[in-house]
Amino acid sequence: PRPKEEKMLPHFFRKDPLDEYFSMELGEEYSRMRDKLIVMLIYATGMRRQEVASLEVGMFDQGRKLFKIIGKGDKEREIPVVGALFEKILLYLHKRKEEFDPEPCNAFFLTDKGAPLYLNFVNNVVKKELAGIEGLEGKISPHVLRHSFATHLLSHGADLRSIQEMLGHSSISTTEIYLYVTTQELRKNYDEAHPHS
């Protein structure tokens, strides 16, 4: 039998540089608001880039403050939206309505010309938005933001089952890799802070 391949540990961003980025305002122009909100949404919800690109306005439930996502294998899941992000989403939707009246399509995020997003658009936005942020190391991509979402949730006390649901993993074993990442991070912090290390 072939030996099991070792799973690559997910790369993630440290929390402090991201906090600084998210404390900045959305801006006034539609494209600036859209780009910033794309990055915020991936980090705050753990959505895949495909899920962000195919997001529709009707998938956002304002009353319940959540997104209804259609993920891999056409599985539906609900992802709650935190208060600060909820306000920014409402601002964005208002700006979107001003910018595109009448609406060209039902896509949540639109290009400058009013077309739905494509996958590379999401990649390029994340790279452009986070390129100049001091303290972000390694590759910059939507998937690294997704990993950061899961890792930060787990390190702040969220249970593995909830993270599995939000990420849309069909198996808990896929989510369990974040346990090892947070243990490694704990070890690193311990080694750096302990006076006898």
Image (spheres, rainbow, N blue to C red):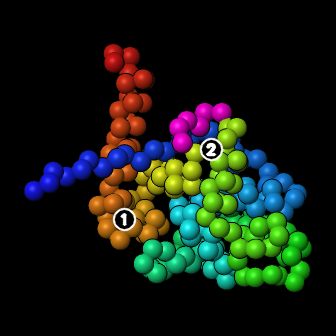
Alpha-carbon span between mark 1 and mark 2? 25 Å
Q: Can residue 84 be seen from the camera position used here?
A: no
Q: Is residue 51 above or below residue 189?
A: below
Q: Amino acid at mark 1?
A: Arg
Q: Main secondary structure of the magenta part?
A: loop
Q: Which residue, given by chain and number where applicable, does mark 1 sit on?
A: 161
Mark number, residue 132? none
Which residues are drawn in magenta?
A: 134-139
- Out of 165 and 47, give the one closest to the viewer: 47
Residue 168 horizontal/vertical position (percent) = 44, 69
Q: Amino acid at mark 2?
A: Leu
Q: Which residue does the image show at 55% across and 35% down from the upper left?
A: 137
Q: How many marks?
A: 2
Residue 59 horizontal/vertical position (percent) = 63, 80
Q: Is residue 70 magenta?
A: no
- Out of 177 and 182, give the one closest to the viewer: 177
Q: Which residue does the image show at 38% across and 16% down from the upper left?
A: 195
Q: Secondary structure at mark 1?
A: helix
Q: Could you tell me which quadrant the N terminus lies in?
A: bottom left
Q: Can residue 164 be seen from the camera position used here?
A: yes
In-image side of 148 versus 66 (left or right): left
Task: Kindly report which numbered mark, 1 or 2, lies closer to the viewer in this rendering.
Answer: 2
Q: Which residue, given by chain and number where applicable, does mark 2 sit on?
A: 18
Q: Residues within 10 Å of mark 1 (few under 14, many from 20)?
A: some
- Out of 166 and 111, give the one closest to the viewer: 111
In-image side of 74 versus 94 (left or right): left
Most extreme residue toward the left, as rendered? 1
Q: Residues within 10 Å of mark 2 (few under 14, many from 20)?
A: some
